Image (spheres, helix red, strand yellow):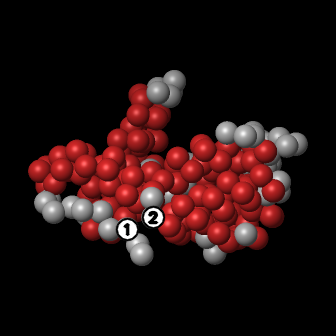
């Protein structure tokens, strides 16, 4: 059984309805057996994925991890994802830092495979961090299947908060915003 959010209206009225019912709809989505199985699998297996190669070779783990960062379309690009993870983000010339889509940088930084001798997957709070993002992005994706404008708005709420908290110049913030395809749209 899959989840379909209830969006009976469009426009501002529909957005208001979604905002009012979002917590309940997310709770319904998270209570679905498929979602609970994915979360249990991730919690059980992510600590054992101590290398980028182990993560990309487990397609289910990789799908959950990529979905948490809005990169689920790259689930079959195993070599590309492995190279991003192994390069890390602390080295200036790493692939994650060179890519225009900064979600890859966030992804590589979150896992820490190329940056630390012990990856962040070994931290006890790591599964909770990634699964919170996975729940949020999964819900956004389902909403987007019915109304992509609402998905873009949900993305904008999250990304603008993160962007506003950065200590960069206003010009840099505008370029960051323009470099993010959903935000630009």
Tell me which corner region of the image, top left, top right, bottom left or bottom right, holds residue 181: bottom left
**Residue 131 location (% of width, % of height):** 57, 51
Image point (70%, 66%), residue name: 80
Q: At 16% from the left edge and 63% from the top edge, which residue is drawn?
A: 8
Circle 2 packing at 10 Å, graded few (<14), some (14-19), many (20+), is few
Q: How far apart in space, not on screen, are marks 1 and 2 (Cα)?
A: 8 Å
Judging depth in this view, the residue of 34 and 75 nearest the camera is 34
Q: Whole-percent x and y of residue 64?
A: 59, 61
Q: Secondary structure at mark 2?
A: loop
Tell me, yes or no, if residue 80 can be seen here: yes
| Element type where label 1 sits in the image | loop
Q: Is 145 left, or right, of 30 in this rendering?
A: left
Residue 2 image point, x, y percent: 41, 72
Residue 37 or 4: which is nearer the viewer? 37
Vertical comparison of 115 with 79: above or below: above
Q: Are marks 1 and 2 in contact (CB under 8 Å)?
A: yes
Image quarter where the N terminus lies is: bottom left
Residue at image coords 47%, 27%? 165
The C terminus lies in quadrant? bottom left
* Mark 1 or 2, nearer chain start: 1
Mark 2 lies on residue? 32
Is 54 left or right of 102, judged from the image as shown?
right
Query: Residue tagged by mark 1?
Result: 3
* Relative to 79, 157 lies left or right: left
**The disc label shown at residue 166, or none:** none
Nearer the observer: mark 1 or 2; the answer is 2
Measured as percent of width and height from the top left, residue 74 is found at 59, 68
| 112 up-or-down from 145: above or below | above
């Amino acid at each position: 059984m899959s989840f379909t959010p209830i969006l009976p209206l469009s426009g501002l009225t529909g957005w208001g309805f979604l905002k009012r019912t979002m917590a309940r709809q997310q709770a319904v989505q998270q209570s679905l057996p498929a979602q609970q199985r994915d979360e249990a699998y991730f919690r059980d297996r992510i600590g054992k994925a101590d290398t980028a190669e182990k993560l990309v070779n487990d397609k289910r783990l990789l799908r959950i991890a990529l979905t948490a960062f809005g990169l689920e379309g790259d689930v079959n690009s195993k070599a590309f994802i492995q190279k991003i993870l192994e390069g890390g983000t602390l080295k200036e010339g790493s692939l994650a830092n060179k890519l225009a889509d900064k979600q890859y940088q966030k992804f590589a930084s979150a896992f820490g495979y190329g940056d630390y001798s012990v990856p962040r997957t070994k931290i006890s709070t790591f599964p909770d961090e990634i699964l919170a993002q996975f729940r949020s992005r999964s819900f956004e994706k389902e909403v987007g299947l019915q109304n992509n404008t609402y998905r873009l708005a949900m993305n904008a709420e999250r990304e603008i908060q993160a962007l506003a908290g950065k200590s960069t110049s206003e010009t840099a913030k505008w370029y960051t915003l323009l470099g993010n395809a959903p935000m630009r749209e």
